[in-house]
Amino acid sequence: MIEITSKDNPLLKTIRRLSQDPSAYRKQGRVWLEGDHLCRAALDRGVKPLQVVVTPSVWNSAPLAWRDVCEQVFVVPDALFQTLSSLESPAQMGFVLDYAAEQQIQSGQPTVVLDRVQDAGNVGAILRSASAFGFKQVVAMRGTAALWSAKVLRAGMGAHFGMNLIEAAAPGLLAQLALPLLTTSSHQGPFLHELLAQQRLPAACVWIMGHEGQGVCEEIMAMAQMRVRIAQPGGEESLNVASAAAICLHASASAALLSVPQ
C-alpha cells in the first residue's frame, strides 16, 4: 500500500485527465473506473487492474480484498480523491485499467452499430441492452461518443467488459460482419412486432442505430437489407435511440428463443 498526499502526483494527474476528458484514454492508454459496482463488474469478467486507488476508509474496511486484486494499491485522502471524481458524490475507490485500442471485427457475431450516436448516456444504455440481449459486439462509427469515456462507462454499468468494442470504424468495415444489416425507419418497412410474430425477424443480425437527430446516414442506410418500423400507437414522432435499440434487441433475442426447438 502506498499513500499519496500530493495533488501533483503523476498518477493523480493522469486520473484527472481520464475523468475529465472523454477521449483522454486514447492518448493515455489507460481507462479510469470509479465506483465499487464498475470495479467489481470488471473483476467478475476477469479484468485485472493496473492500479487500485482508494480512500483511507475503504482501505481500512477491506484491505485484504483490494490487496489481492492488484500489486499497486494507492491510498488517497478523501479531499484529494474528490479532485479525481466527475461525480457529485465521489465513490471513494477506483481502478486504472490498461486500454487495448486495436480490436478486430468478429465476423458472424450479432452486432450493434452506432452511427454517430453522440449522447454518452444513450451510448452506455445501448451497450447495456446489447449485452443483456446477447449482442456481444458493438461497432462505433466515427462521430460516436467515446466508448470508454467516464460517462459511457457509468451508463454501461459494466457491460463493456463482456463485449468486443470497436471504435472509429468506417462504413466499409460493415461488410466484414457477414450478417443481415437492419435499421429502423419511422415511415418505411414492415413493423417489428409483425416480423417477430411471423418469425421473419433474423435472430442473428446487425442492428444499426443512428444519430439522435439525423438518424442513420444515407451511405449506411443504403447497405441495410431491411428497414423496420416500431409501432407507436401513442402517436409520438420518434423514440429515443436507446429506447429504440432496447426494443429491437429484445425482439431479436425473442426471435432467437422462438427458433429453438421445444
Image (spheres, rainbow, N blue to C red):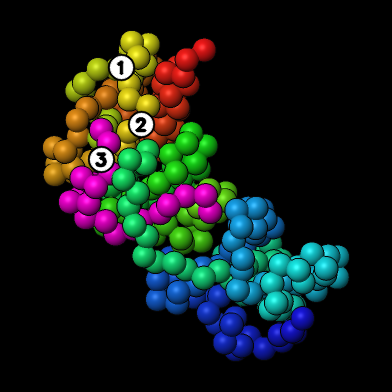
Asked whether residue 168 is drawn in magenta, I would say: yes
Q: Does dot 3 land on a helix, a strand or a loop?
A: loop
Is 68 placed above or below 4 here?
above
The 10 Å Cα crowd at callout 1, few under 14, some 14 to 19, many 20 or more, is few
User: Looking at the picture, which amino acid does disc 1 mark?
Assistant: Arg
Mark nearer the N terminus (3 vs 1): 3
The residue at the point 25 percent across, 17 percent down is: 190
Residue underneath mark 3? 178
Which percent across, then down, holds residue 194? 33, 12
Q: Residue furthest right?
A: 61
Which percent across, then down, holds residue 136? 44, 44
State which region is magenta. Answer: 161-180
Is residue 86 visible in the rendered structure shown here?
Answer: yes
Residue underneath mark 1? 200
User: Looking at the picture, which amino acid does disc 3 mark?
Assistant: Ala
| Displayed quadrant of residue 101 | bottom left
Q: Is residue 117 found left or right of 156 in the rendered image? A: left
Which percent across, then down, holds residue 227? 22, 27
Residue underneath mark 2? 204
The residue at the point 76 percent across, 68 percent down is: 68
Q: CA distance from mark 3 to mark 1?
A: 18 Å
Pick whichever, 75 or 97, lies toward us. Answer: 97
Mark nearer the N terminus (3 vs 2): 3
Q: Does dot 2 land on a helix, a strand or a loop?
A: loop
Which percent across, then down, holds residue 42? 61, 57
Asked whether residue 71 is drawn in magenta, I would say: no
Q: CA distance from mark 3 to mark 2?
A: 10 Å
The residue at the point 69 percent across, 72 percent down is: 70
